[in-house]
C-alpha cells in the first residue's frame, strides 16, 4: 500500500503561481485547484479548506515564535546565568536557526503538505525516520502547549492582583495552582477556536500578531527614549563564570538557552500548507519573514531593555525579568498596557502551537501512524478541520499543567526537554536532507525557492548547529534541570532519560504495533482520474 503516492517526485506540473490558463473545456483553473492537484500527486485527497493568504501564513510562524512571549518569559534566565552579555546569544541562535530555516524553505516549496516536519522526514529519510520525527514533534508540541500557558501566571498577576484567584500568591503552591487555572482557561479557549476551523483561528491569530508587532515596535521606541547607558553595557558579565572551567564561555552556553528556547517553530508557516493558497511559493517566504522579524524586533527589545533599565545590577532584573524593566522604566500605566499586549501575544502563541499540533496529528493519523487513526484523521464536514486532535491535544496539555502544582522541578525539566525534542525533530529532517545532497539525489522544486550551490554548505551548517545546540540544551546542568533541592540524579540527567523513554518507547510501539499498518487510509487517499474512453 503506497504511503503518499509520489515517491520522491517534486511538485508536479509547474502550474505554479498564476493559477490561470484555460482547461480543455474552456473553464479557467483557480489557484486552489492547482494546489489541490499538487496535493493529489502526494497521494492525499484535498480535505482541508484553503483560506489562508500571505499574511496568515506569516502570522502563524511569527506567533509560534512569539517574540513578546519568549523574551518576557525568559529574559530573567539569560541575565541570571550570563549577565547583560548574554544578549550576544540572540544573534548566535538566529544565525544557526537561519541555516535550518533555509533548508526548510526548500522543503516547503517542494512538499507543501500538512504536518511539515513529519512529512519532510518521511520523504527524505523513509517512513521510520518520518514517524520518529513526527512523534518527537507531536510530544514536544503537547508539552509546549502547557509551558506557554504558564506564561499567563508570569504576566497577569503583575498587571493586577485580581488575577491571583487562588490565595494571595505567598502560599507554597498558590502560584502553581493559579498558573494551572489560568493556563487551563487559555487551553480551553484555543481548543474551541481551533475546533471551529482554520478561518476563525487565522483571523484571531492575525489580529493578535498585528497587535504584537505594533506593541513590539512601540516598546522598542519607548525603551530607546529612556536609554541611560551606552552599548558597552552588553559586554558586561558581572563576573559570572570567573574561576570555572572554560570561564565565561561555559556560563554563556547556559545563558544561550534563553534565546534557543524562543527562536523555533517557524515551520508552522508551512504546516498549514493544505489550508494555504499557493503554499509552495508563500510558505518559504513566510518562514524567512517570521524568523527575520522575530530576530530583529526581539533583539532590539532585549538590547534597549538592558540599556534603559535604571539599575543594571538590580536583583529584580533576574527575578522579574522584562516585566520589571518595563514597569520601572516606563511607569505603571504604560507598563501595564505593554503587559496586556504580552498577554495577547501569549494567547496567539498558544493558538499557533495548538494549530501546529493538530495538523501534525492529522498528517500522521492520515497515514495510519497513530492509535485510532481513522478517528483522529476525520475532518469535520462543517468546520473543515480535524476536531478530535484539537480536543485530545488540549486535554493532554491540561493534564501536563497539573504536574506543575506539586512537582515544579519535574515540570521545568519536561518543558526544557520539549524544546530539545523539537531541535532533534529538526535534525531528523536536515540530516537525511544532507545525505540526499551528498548522494546527489536531492532536487528542489522547479521554479520555486532553491538554495542553489549554497545548499550543501548551508545544510552542513544546519546539521552541525542542530547537533551542537541539542547537546548544549541537554547537557546535565544541575542549575537548569535541578535548580533547587532536593537534588536527584534523574532530574539532572532528565533530558537523556526523558528523550530516551519517549523516543525509544514510542518507536518500540511503532515498530511492533503500528509499522505494518501504516499507509494512507482509504478515506484520505487521492482518487486519480480514470482515463476516459475515446468518443465514438
Image: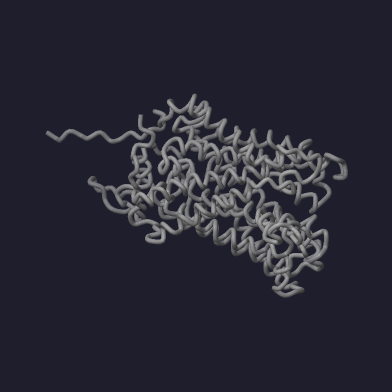
Query: Is residue 527 found left or right of 64 in the rendered image?
Result: left
Q: Position of residue 51 (x, y in %)?
A: 47, 47
Quadrant of the frame with the C terminus: top left
Taking the spot 76% from the left edge, 62% from the top edge, the residue there is 242
Taking the spot 83% from the left edge, 59% from the top edge, the residue there is 315
Colour scheme of the picture: one colour
> Does residue 279 appear in this view?
no
Query: Is residue 51 found left or right of 67 in the rendered image?
Result: left
Q: Position of residue 209 (x, y in %)?
A: 60, 55
Quadrant of the frame with the N terminus: top left
Q: Position of residue 219 (x, y in %)?
A: 69, 65
- How many labels, in total? 0
Compared with 314, 13 (above or below) is above
Query: Is residue 242 found left or right of 281 in the rendered image?
Result: right
Q: Nearer the viewer, residue 224 or 513?
A: 513
Q: Nearer the viewer, residue 110 or 29?
A: 110
Task: Residue 214: name its quadrant.
Answer: bottom right
> Does residue 425 appear in this view?
yes
Compared with 186, 372 (above or below) is above
Farthest residue to the left: give it.
536
Q: Position of residue 369 (x, y in %)?
A: 48, 31
Task: Residue 249: name its quadrant.
Answer: bottom right
Amino acid at each position: 500500500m503506497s504511503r503518499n503516492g509520489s515517491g520522491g517526485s517534486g511538485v508536479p506540473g509547474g502550474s505554479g503561481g498564476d493559477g490561470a490558463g484555460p482547461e480543455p473545456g474552456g473553464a479557467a483553473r483557480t489557484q486552489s485547484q492547482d494546489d489541490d492537484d499538487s496535493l493529489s500527486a502526494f497521494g492525499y485527497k484535498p480535505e482541508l479548506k484553503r483560506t489562508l493568504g500571505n499574511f496568515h501564513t506569516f502570522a502563524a510562524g511569527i506567533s509560534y515564535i512569539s517574540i513578546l512571549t519568549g523574551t518576557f518569559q525568559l529574559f530573567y534566565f539569560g541575565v541570571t546565568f550570563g549577565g547583560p552579555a548574554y544578549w550576544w546569544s540572540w544573534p548566535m541562535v538566529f544565525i544557526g536557526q537561519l541555516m535550518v530555516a533555509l533548508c526548510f524553505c526548500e522543503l516547503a516549496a517542494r512538499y507543501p503538505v500538512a504536518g511539515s516536519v513529519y512529512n519532510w522526514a518521511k520523504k527524505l529519510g523513509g517512513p521510520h525516520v518520518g514517524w520518529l520525527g513526527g512523534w518527537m514533534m507531536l510530544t514536544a508540541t503537547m508539552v509546549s502547549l502547557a509551558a506557554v500557558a504558564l506564561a499567563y501566571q508570569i504576566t497577569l498577576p503583575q498587571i493586577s492582583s485580581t488575577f491571583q484567584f487562588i490565595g494571595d500568591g505567598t502560599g507554597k503552591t498558590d502560584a502553581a495552582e493559579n498558573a494551572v487555572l489560568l493556563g487551563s482557561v487559555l487551553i480551553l479557549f484555543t481548543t474551541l477556536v481551533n475546533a471551529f476551523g482554520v478561518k476563525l483561528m487565522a483571523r484571531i491569530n492575525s489580529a493578535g500578531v498585528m497587535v504584537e508587532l505594533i506593541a513590539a515596535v512601540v516598546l522598542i521606541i519607548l525603551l530607546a527614549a529612556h536609554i541611560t547607558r551606552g552599548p558597552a553595557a552588553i559586554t558586561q558579565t558581572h563576573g559570572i563564570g570567573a574561576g570555572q572551567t572554560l570561564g565565561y564561555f561555559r556560563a554563556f552556553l547556559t545563558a544561550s538557552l534563553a534565546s534557543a528556547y524562543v527562536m523555533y517553530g517557524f515551520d508552522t508557516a508551512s504546516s498549514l500548507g493544505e489550508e494555504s493558497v499557493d503554499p509552495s511559493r508563500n510558505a518559504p517566504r513566510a518562514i524567512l519573514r517570521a524568523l527575520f522579524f522575530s530576530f530583529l524586533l526581539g533583539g532590539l527589545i532585549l538590547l534597549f531593555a538592558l540599556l534603559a533599565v535604571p539599575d543594571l545590577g538590580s536583583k529584580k532584573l533576574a527575578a522579574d525579568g522584562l516585566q520589571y524593566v518595563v514597569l520601572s522604566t516606563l511607569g505603571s500605566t504604560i507598563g501595564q498596557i505593554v503587559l496586556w499586549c504580552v498577554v495577547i501575544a501569549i494567547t496567539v502563541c498558544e493558538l499557533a502551537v495548538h494549530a501546529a499540533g493538530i495538523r501534525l496529528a492529522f498528517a500522521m493519523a492520515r497515514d495510519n501512524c497513530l492509535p485510532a487513526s481513522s478517528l483522529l484523521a476525520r475532518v469535520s464536514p462543517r468546520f473543515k478541520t480535524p476536531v478530535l486532535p484539537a480536543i485530545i491535544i488540549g486535554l493532554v496539555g491540561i493534564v501536563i499543567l497539573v504536574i506543575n502544582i506539586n512537582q515544579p522541578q519535574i515540570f521545568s525539566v519536561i518543558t526544557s526537554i520539549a524544546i530539545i525534542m523539537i531541535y532533534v525533530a529538526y535534525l531528523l529532517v536536515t540530516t537525511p536532507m544532507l545525505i540526499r545532497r551528498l548522494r546527489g539525489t536531492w532536487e528542489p522544486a522547479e521554479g520555486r525557492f532553491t538554495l542553489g550551490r549554497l545548499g550543501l554548505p548551508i545544510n552542513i551548517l544546519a546539521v552541525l548547529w542542530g547537533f551542537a545546540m541539542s547537546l548544549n540544551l541537554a547537557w546535565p546542568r544541575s542549575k537548569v534541570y535541578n535548580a533547587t533541592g532536593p537534588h536527584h540524579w534523574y532530574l539532572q540527567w532528565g533530558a537523556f532519560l526523558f528523550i530516551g523513554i519517549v523516543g525509544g518507547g514510542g518507536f518500540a510501539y511503532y515498530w511492533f504495533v503500528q509499522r505494518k499498518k501504516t499507509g494512507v487510509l482509504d478515506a484520505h487517499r487521492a482518487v486519480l482520474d480514470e482515463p476516459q474512453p475515446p468518443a465514438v
